Amino acid sequence: MKIEGEEERYPLGEVSGRTLIDIGSGPTIYQLLSACTHFEDITMTDFLEVNRQELGLWLREEAGAFDWSTYSRHVCLIEGKGESWQEKEHQLRATVKRVLPIDVHQPQPLGTGSLAPLPADALVSAFCLEAVSPDLASFQRALDHITTLLRPGGHLLLIGALEESWYLAGEVRLVVVPVCEEEVREALVHSGYEVRDLRTYTMPAHLRTGVDDVKGIFFAWAQKKVGV
């Protein structure tokens, strides 16, 4: 399933700047393949050290790193710039300046004395906040916390699961807060954003593999109001 929206905002020039923070990167880089063209300084973050180590392997092009070339090729195809996937990956590696620990449930998610330049011009977060929040109140607080990292007028690109209550991490069944489209919209407004775009997609039956009970995906583009 193609999630439209994120790659559209960057080429239009509406989401750009100098600094970008990826909230809860996990061990993945796909969510930044379009962003690296529009920002000079990207910070990747994750709560788990094992995920940060995996990112380091890829960034340093070390043996054992996951091969993201299929994803890089697909992004290049979507963007249609004639750029090779090798150029795309080289640019992303050059733009990611640091990989830092984060805890979205803390009022200062990056801790004190963070190495990330703050406040950031933009935030990206994919499948993080709902996955680490046991209930809607925790989801709202986590969104409030990461919003402190963003400058007034800055942009948030938020992607997540709809109506998902659990997923499997290996053999461990983890609890997820099931959010609907309206709850996502209300949470963004409560955190001081103007919702510029909010789209939802139903998960096709052939992609339901039994590792979770997700019903769909949401993509939100929001802009932090001045004075918040």
Image: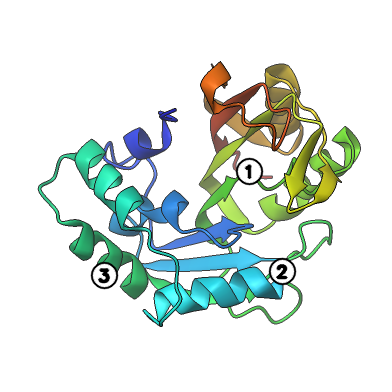
Q: Quadrant of residue 6?
A: top left
Q: Is residue 127 left or right of residue 57?
A: right
Identity of the residue drawn at 57% across and 37% down: 159
In this view, which residue lies farthest toward the left? 82
Q: Residues within 10 Å of mark 3 (few under 14, many from 20)?
A: few
Q: Secondary structure at mark 3?
A: helix
Identity, as a three-letter code, of the amino acid under mark 2: Leu
Identity, as a three-letter code, of the amino acid under mark 1: Phe
| 105 is higher (above) or lower (below) than 179 | below
Q: Secondary structure at mark 2?
A: loop
Q: Residue under circle 1?
A: 127
Identity, as a three-letter code, of the amino acid under mark 3: His
Identity of the residue drawn at 31% across and 51% down: 70
Q: Secondary structure at mark 1?
A: loop
Q: Residue under circle 3?
A: 90
> 68 or 46: nearer the eye?
68
Q: Residue 171: give x, y in percent of width and height.
A: 79, 51
Count of picture labels: 3
| 201 is higher (above) or lower (below) than 52 | above
Q: Quadrant of residue 96?
A: bottom left
Q: Can the viewer see residue 202 in this picture?
A: no
Q: Residue 161: give x, y in percent of width and height.
A: 66, 32
Q: Residue under circle 2?
A: 48
Marks 3 and 1 in Cβ contact (< 8 Å): no
Q: Is residue 94 left or right of residue 201?
A: left
- Label 2 and label 1: CA atoms lie apart by 15 Å
> 21 or 166: nearer the eye?
166
Marks 2 and 3 in Cβ contact (< 8 Å): no
Quarter of the image with the C terminus in it: top right
Q: Can the viewer see residue 39 in this picture?
A: yes
